[in-house]
Image (spheres, helix red, strand yellow):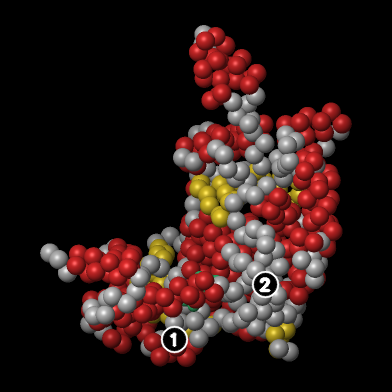
Amino acid sequence: MPKLTELASWKALEAHFEQIKDVHMRDLFAQEEKEAGQRFRKFSTQMDDILLDFSKNRINDETFKLLCDLAREVDIEGWRDQMFSGEPINISEFRPVLHTALRNRSNTPVYVDGENVMPKINRVLAQIRYFTERVRGGHLRGYTGRLIKDVINIGIGGSDLGPHVVCDSMKPYAQRGMNVHFVSNIDPTHLTEILKFVEPESTLFIVSSKTFTTQETLLNAQSARKWFVELTGNEKAVARHFVAVTANKQAAAEFGILEENMFEFWDWVGGRYSLWSAIGLPIALYLGMDHFEALLDGAHAMDMHFKSVPIEKNMPVILALLGIWYNNFFDAQSHAVMAYNQYLRRLPAYLQQLDMESNGKTINRQGERVDYLTGPIIWGETGSNCQHAFFQLLHQGTKPVPADFLIPAQTRNPLGDQHCVLLANFLAQTRALMKGKTEAEARSELEAQGVTEEKIEDVLPHKIFEGNKPTNSIVFKNLDPRTLGALLAMYEHKVFVQGVIWNINSFDQWGVEYGKQLAADIQNTLHARTDVSRYDDSTNSLIDYSMKLNFSD
Ligand code: G6Q
């Protein structure tokens, strides 16, 4: 394949960028309103009740056409089909990438090395249903006969962020009296603070680790086990209160988990794409299997949309192309996500891993260094909180920050007019970011407030808003499991499309593996408390300083 920057569509985009880079969206809207009022119709698309309005972007018909040409020229459709059909597209780990099979509700065969993987996926789903229904129905209880009321998931990264965002977002669907907690950090504070509020007799621990070698998870699991045995004095009861989710059953067995308490998944499921697998066990325990399956249904519906809808109306492809437009042509370094919904407060953390671990790469599929920008920095916060924090920079800062705004049209918690006010804020912000405030508008506002002419001249520059800041608006009826599944799958496919365009492998994570390797050596040094001078001067001095503080009164 020719280099990205040498593709005909890329070159055409470069030339087109020079023509459009200073065009204001205000003028694009005004012009198209005059012509036909069709901008929203042209630049919006829908999947079920999820609407994506991308008309508030710095694009015109030509931009959109060229971006779609780019998607075709890199053969998005071909790559997509390779992923869905189990081709080993994760080239540095020699694996297929089959999270879509986990939610393949049509149950059509999916082959890995000649084996249809659907029967084993269905077997684990049935195992999850059986287990969670018995726990939730009170048939499977703690060793003293008490109902399980606290589930503690011990896992990190992909074995934490996915189920965590789903459980947090789906709180209204949780079973009464059932709580779920997530322990990820190796900082002992994380586990300790949770254990303070639970009782061992009514607590179920899920040790979630694909590799079952992750230090944080194994140490937290050992500490949890120790706590459990100390409080109950009953070593045997561990079997009833600890289960494992893993692709490495042997390591889980060595850890002491019984075979019947293991929920399996497979190496063709990437950690950050694994919430649809047995890693979703805490979701099924907390929300019930029917809701977990509704989540899978929603993701499958988005998979079908991604597979079958033409590029021009394909939600994940459009989001990906717009991201490329700002990242590679406008040099936007970051992308923000603002969910105007309190339940979605963990969405940015989840998307940070999904996007930055997938596309934070500098080496292309041919093993060469790329000479263009790849994955952006992802960040965000819930609305309307974000407006009172960092929105100043979005409105008047020097850095371009394209953003996604999400909102459900209905609220689960109607309180007076509050949801309507939330919606008004959502709409006002995206409009203001697009439109800005001109000098004439700012001046007439000041005049209307009775500000003197002299003062107006002083403050005027500060009151002007350039606008022309791009946003995508994503509006849906309700935040329910099906919609959440579709939204998360939408972002997964967006990331996939961008990875294909940047010609990188979105499915490995050698930076994470490096992190796992790094601490081991220093940890030995800290334990031995000798030979503390073999690192660089900064690290040596930090070791020295922290060891002194650690052992001081
Ligand atoms: C995800 C990454 C990483 C991983 C964690 C936990 O794609 O590989 O975040 O999920 O490091 O790994 P284990 O599940 O193997 O403990």
Residues at circles 1 and 2 in contact by the CB criterion of under 8 Å: no
How far apart marks 1 and 2 lie (CA) works out to: 38 Å
Asked if residue 447 is positioned above or below residue 523 in the image, the reply reads above
Dot 2 corresponds to which residue?
Answer: 368
* Residue mark closest to the camera, 1 vs 2: 2
Q: Which residue is drawn at 32% across and 77% down?
A: 534
Front one among 518 and 337: 518
Q: Quadrant of the C terminus?
A: bottom left
- For mark 2, does the 10 Å Cα neighbourhood hold few (<14), some (14 to 19), or many (20 or more) residues? few
Q: Which residue is drawn at 24% across and 80% down?
A: 530
| Residue 502, visible in the rendered structure | yes
Q: Which amino acid does label 1 sit on?
A: Ala
SS for dot 1: helix
Q: Where is residue 352 in the image (x, y as percent from the top left)?
A: 54, 59
Q: Which residue is drawn at 72% across and 31% down?
A: 26
Front one among 311 and 202: 311
Q: Quadrant of the N terminus?
A: bottom right
Q: In this view, does 64 lie to the left or right of 534?
A: right
Q: Residue furthest front?
A: 537
Quadrant of the rendered image containing residue 443: top right
Dot 1 corresponds to which residue?
Answer: 252
Q: Position of residue 298 (x, y in %)?
A: 66, 62
